[in-house]
Image (cartoon, helix red, strand yellow):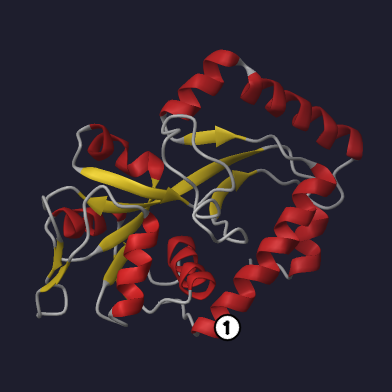
Amino acid sequence: MKLPLPQVLNLGRAAANLTVISVILLALNSPGAWSQTARTVKIVVPFPPGGPLADLLNAARAQPGELTLATVGPATSPHIAFERLKRVANINMTFVPYAGTAPSVNALLGGHVTAAIADYRDVIAQMKAGKLRALATASRTRLEPVPDVPTVAESGYRDYEAEGWFGMVAPAKTPRETVSQFAGWLIAALQAPEINRKLVDLGLFPVGMCGVDFGAHLRKQYEEYGRIIREANIKAE
């Protein structure tokens, strides 16, 4: 059952959460240019493979609607992350939704789309193999496993942040003492070096945000995501 926001926030004496970080990717399959054929017309963008996120965004401004970006969608958090990027960077790229991360990454590797947004955990292998290059992370801070990859905020869009997360909530009438006990157990587990290391290796980054802080985070995302969904007329399918 879907609950209205106030009731969700009443549940939100959160125990702990894990952050899932998305990255903006390019395929390293072209030595001196981008090419994409997703719109039947092949477009070659004079863009060096080692260039920053700014080069992608400048190319998008120079060719409104011609460059394409793939991700899981529609009506998913990566879709919203893309729509948010369009707004803060004032660009017009064509959204190409796929039914999963693997198809969207394959489209990028095959040169059918210009770029992609994907969770870091889903593209670790391709990045390590040199098949994909991350232009930027969607998180507020850089990722420890790829410290040389800047954030979108560092690239000139300081208000941009798009993170997925996993969290735990309890029924509204759960005693505070019980919630605190569960929160303590979970935070201790997330902080345990062995567990922390395994989670980071999987692209999951422990946060341990609880109580009022987590409730405020939920409200902020509810308001920001709601605004973008309305502006972009995003519909669930």
* Horizontal relation, residue 35 to residue 118: left or right: left
The spot of residue 127 in percent (x, y) is: 27, 38
Which residue shows up at 53% across the image and 59% down it? 156
Q: Is residue 13 above or below residue 234?
A: above
Q: Is mark 1 on a helix, strand or loop?
A: helix
Depth order, front residue of 175/68: 68
Q: How many labels does the image show?
A: 1
Q: How crowded is mark 1: few (under 14 residues within 10 Å), some or many (20 or more)?
A: few
Which residue lies at the image location 46% right of the left edge and 22% below the top edge?
198
Q: Name the residue under label 1.
A: 230
Residue 230 in view in this figure: yes
In the image, what residue type sits under mark 1? Arg
Of residues 39 and 203, which is closer to you in this image? Answer: 39
Q: Where is residue 58 in the image (x, y as percent from the top left)?
A: 35, 69
- Left/right of residue 104 with respect to residue 184 in the rendered view: left
Q: In which quarter of the image is the N terminus?
A: bottom right
Quadrant in which residue 227 is drawn: bottom right
Residue 74 image point, x, y percent? 39, 72
Instruction: Give the answer, above or below, for where 174 lies relative to 56.
Output: above
Residue 98 position, x and y percent, is 28, 65
Q: Residue at x 73, y 24 (%)?
A: 185
